[in-house]
Image (cartoon, helix red, strand yellow):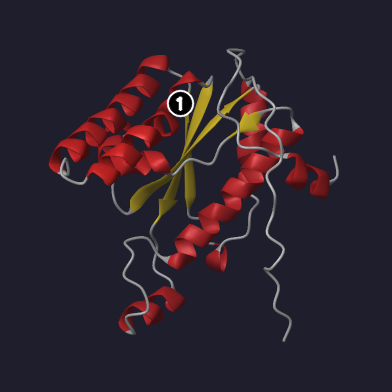
Amino acid sequence: MEIIDAIKGRRSIRKYKPDPVPKGDIDKIIESACWAPSGSNMQQWKFIVIEDSSLKEKLANAIENVAGDTAEKFKDDTELVKRLERSLPAYTFFKNAPVVIACIVEEVPSTSGKIMATRGAYTSTISIVGLSSVSAAIQNLLLTAYSLGYGTCWMTGPLIAKKEMEDILGIIEPHHLVALIPLGKPDETPEPKPRREDVIDYR
């Protein structure tokens, strides 16, 4: 498959067939992620492959509990509560996929990160260098999965329960959970969404 065809053909899939994903395919998908570029070649990514249904259910329950607590705490903010209620199914559908890949970044020192921090250029707990590196790995993962006939979805909504999920998965600092990627044979065929064209500024 031409890389441009994979880029244009990939979709965010939210419904999956129950067929198991062979370990060889999972390994190939993760291998492609590990060939992504990274800041100073630090390769600060890790992946947890989750196939156990009870573990997926436990993660989804953690998200639902945080959503419930948040809705109760901000019950006077009716717009926030409504948005949270609408979003919750989109945060937990991963539990129905045969495989879920938890994507983790290891926070490691970088020269550019230290300089930006001293200048107050950003205050995120995860550096731009780390997020950029693991994001490149995730993109490789998505494209390789698609080329092998699988569907995926890059999920950050579940991070409303980041701490709770990290506790469940045994992720401790300097590691951070940055995304969940459900993986499986797609059980839907979404149409492509329009792309912006006003994104280039030649100078």
Residue at x 52%, y 61% (from the top left corner): 132
- Position of 91 with respect to 72 (left or right) is right
Q: Nearer the viewer, residue 60 or 167?
A: 60
SS label for mark 1: helix
Which x, y percent locates residue 120? 32, 80
Residue beneath label 1, please?
A: 93
Q: Is residue 84 left or right of residue 38?
A: left
Q: Is residue 126 left or right of residue 203?
A: left
Residue 165 rendering spot, x and y as whole percentages: 31, 36
Residue 9 position, x and y percent, is 76, 40
Above or below residue 4? Residue 96 is above
Q: Nearer the viewer, residue 63 or 172?
A: 63
Q: Position of residue 115 (x, y in %)?
A: 39, 82
In this rendering, the answer to whether 157 lies above or below 51 is below
Placement of 49 over or under 115, stated as above or below: above
Residue type at the position of mark 1? Phe
Q: Nearer the viewer, residue 13 or 149?
A: 13
Q: Is residue 35 left or right of residue 162?
A: right
Q: Quadrant of residue 8?
A: top right
Q: Quadrant of the C terminus?
A: bottom right
Residue 31 at least partly seen: yes
Identify the residue shown where x is 38% and y is 38%. Answer: 158
Q: Is residue 34 something that shows in the picture?
A: no
Q: Quadrant of the N terminus?
A: top right
Figure label count: 1
- Residue 15 in which image quadrant: top right
Q: Is residue 107 above or below residue 186?
A: below
Q: At x 55% / y 68%, what residue is drawn?
A: 40
Residue that lies at the very extreme toward the right in this rendered image: 2
